Amino acid sequence: MKVLTANRLTDGEAVWYSDTNGWQDVIQGSTLAEDKTGEERLDAIGKAAFAQNLVTDVDLIDVNVVDGAIVPQRLRERIRAAGPTNRLDHGKQARAA
């Protein structure tokens, strides 16, 4: 499974694409691509958003769904989804649930 991620151009914030919410600040609720057709659809959405100067560094990333939560497979993407590893009181991980 994959989700679409990027960085918002206005502030550099890591964002994920959701059919419901558009580009959102959290990975939970992102639209999952479960097959090649889904990946191609998300890729087209990412390319269009890049062309409109909404986001940069657009990428499809591998994820697993664990107990209903979307968990990136790569450590780099887990850090982007949560925040810095040296201070848990900063970044997305410090926000109220």
Image (cartoon, helix red, strand yellow):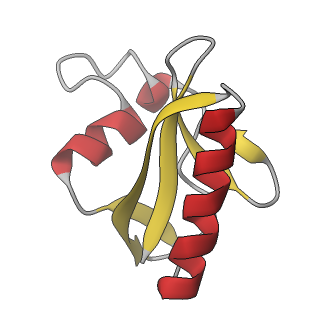
Residue 78 point in image, percent of width and height = 29, 46
Q: Quadrant of the C terminus?
A: top right
Q: Residue furthest front?
A: 51
Residue appearing at x 55%, y 73% in the figure:
40
Q: Would you place residue 46 above or below residue 82 in this image?
A: below
Name the side, left or right, on which 44 lies relative to 71.
Answer: right
Name the side, left or right, on which 13 lies relative to 29.
Answer: left
Residue appearing at x 37%, y 16% in the figure:
89
Q: Would you place residue 84 above or below residue 15 in this image?
A: above
Name the side, left or right, on which 12 lies relative to 49.
Answer: left
Residue 18 point in image, percent of width and height = 70, 56
Front-most of residues 79 and 93: 79
Q: Quadrant of the N terminus?
A: bottom left
Q: Would you place residue 38 above or below residue 70 in this image?
A: below
Front-most of residues 22 and 90: 22
Residue 96 point in image, percent of width and height = 60, 30
Q: Quadrant of residue 62?
A: bottom left
Residue appearing at x 18%, y 48% in the figure:
75
Residue 44 point in image, percent of width and height = 62, 60
| Residue 38 in view in this figure | yes
